[in-house]
Image (cartoon, grey):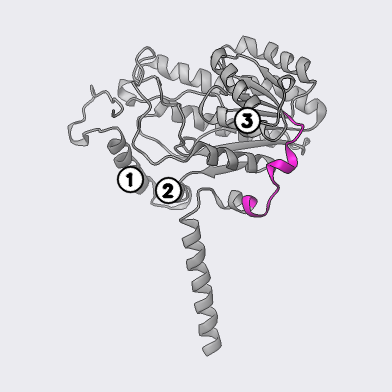
């Protein structure tokens, strides 16, 4: 009997230690395991041709910087050509890369007619595309009741249709070579509801469904990997000048009082998930990560999580929940 008690006590201790470790982690269990025992980006990515959209700032810029240190050939795309040139200079100054290894390719995700020519340009420059990282996108901040339909159209056009279009342009090349990776920077908003971001959330849910379907259709191409990256709040500029209730009205700044992950840490986890061929990963600081598990697996998730999330959003944006009405317009806190 004494031996059984010791065994139960040991099991309880191990469970407690595991829970304590989980409450300190910033990624899901599969990614946590890959970071501990999986392949390293330094072992896999050298010499690859990597195309990064949304590369002019935030996560995209950090992706370019970290990839440049791994000796890859880089294609940098975004709308702002001057910012892309700035990122290119940073890569050349700080990375293990030469001028001939970087192609600056301005691209507007909303201009789908240009995507095929952009793909041809990359193939002409480097001869192949090994990895497409769909990072470009826009956010949105306003109540559903106040949001003009043009905002929904613009966000879906950029975040969903633009990503699908570029993926479809690159996909035939990957299928011809029977290898490659398609990585999409989705969001925890693609899994759970985020108040004040209805158009953004809708676009991310759509992307998640599209990518799951695409992966299932590639069953005859086991070496073409599709990865959905779902980060929580990260230090980036995604909410800077984001549309609010109408397309022409934007947020005045990018300051939101929520706990954010450092961009460098997020990108490191993205690269680890990419080289270990993880289909979907969750990256978020606590308690956000715990909230994701709660939403995904707990029967009482709707009421509990929605209330918790709404309180956090209201606090972050200085919203007086006691004085809300249909004509209320949110403005980010100074």
Outermost residue, bottom side? 1
User: In the displayed structure, does residue 172 sit left or right of residue 105?
Assistant: right
Q: Secondary structure at mark 1?
A: helix
State whether residue 103 is above or below residue 198: above
Where is residue 53? Give x, y as percent: 60, 23
Question: Mark 1 to mark 3: distance in Å?
Answer: 42 Å
Q: Which mark is residue 291?
A: 2
Mark closest to the chain's N terminus, 1 or 3: 3
In the foreground, 70 or 8: 70
Q: Residue at x 63, y 39 (%)?
A: 271
Tell me the crowding category of disc 2: few under 14, some 14 to 19, or many 20 or more residues within 10 angstroms, Cα based: some
- Mark 1–mark 2 Cα distance, whole angstroms, equals 9 Å
Name the one closer to the observer, 120 or 265: 265
Examine the rendered structure and indicate whether residue 303 appears above or below residue 49.
below
Contact, mark 1 vs mark 2 (Cβ under 8 Å): yes
Magenta residue check for 35:
yes
Which badge, 2 or 3, is on the more N-terminal residue? 3
Q: Residue at x 74, y 43 (%)?
A: 43
Measuring from the top left, give residue 311's x and y in whole percent.
Answer: 29, 41
**Tag 2 secondary structure:** helix
Camera sees residue 1: no
Q: Residue furthest left?
A: 323
Q: Is residue 206 above or below residue 99?
A: below
Residue 92 x/y as whole percent: 65, 25
Q: Is residue 308 magenta?
A: no
Dot label at residue 308: 1
Q: Which residues are magenta?
A: 34-49
Q: Would residue 274 be visible to someone looking at this image?
A: yes
Q: Which mark is residue 318?
A: none
Given residues 113 and 259, the one toward you in this image is 259
Residue occupied by mark 3: 94
Q: Residue at x 50, y 78 (%)?
A: 9
């Amino acid at each position: 009997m004494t031996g059984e008690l010791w065994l139960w006590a040991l099991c309880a201790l191990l469970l407690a230690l595991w829970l304590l470790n989980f409450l300190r982690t910033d990624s899901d269990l599969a990614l946590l395991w890959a970071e501990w025992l999986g392949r390293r980006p330094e072992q896999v990515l050298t010499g690859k041709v990597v195309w990064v959209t949304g590369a002019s700032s935030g996560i995209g810029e950090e992706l370019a910087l970290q990839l440049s240190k791994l000796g890859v050939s880089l294609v940098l795309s975004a709308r702002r050509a001057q910012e892309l040139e700035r990122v290119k200079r940073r890569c050349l100054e700080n990375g293990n890369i030469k001028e001939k290894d970087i192609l600056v390719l301005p691209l507007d995700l909303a201009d789908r007619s240009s995507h095929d020519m952009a793909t041809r340009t990359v193939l002409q420059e480097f001869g192949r595309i090994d990895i497409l990282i769909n990072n470009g996108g826009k956010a949105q901040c306003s109540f559903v009741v106040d949001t003009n339909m043009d905002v929904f159209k613009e966000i879906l056009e950029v975040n969903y249709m633009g990503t699908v279009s570029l993926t479809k342009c690159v996909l035939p090349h990957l299928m011809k070579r029977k290898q490659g990776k398609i990585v999409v920077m989705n969001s925890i908003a693609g899994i759970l509801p985020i108040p004040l971001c209805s158009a953004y959330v809708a676009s991310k849910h759509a992307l998640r469904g599209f990518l799951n379907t695409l992966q299932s259709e590639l069953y005859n191409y086991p070496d073409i990997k599709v990865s959905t990256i779902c980060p929580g709040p990260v230090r980036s500029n995604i909410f800077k000048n984001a549309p609010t209730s109408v397309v022409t009205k934007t947020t005045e700044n990018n300051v939101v009082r929520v706990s954010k992950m450092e961009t460098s840490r997020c990108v490191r986890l993205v690269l680890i998930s990419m080289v270990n061929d993880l289909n979907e990963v969750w990256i978020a600081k606590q308690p956000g990560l715990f909230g994701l598990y709660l939403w995904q697996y707990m029967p009482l998730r709707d009421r509990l999580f929605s209330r918790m999330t709404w309180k956090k959003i209201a606090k972050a944006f200085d919203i007086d929940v006691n004085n809300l009405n249909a004509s209320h317009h949110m403005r980010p806190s100074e």
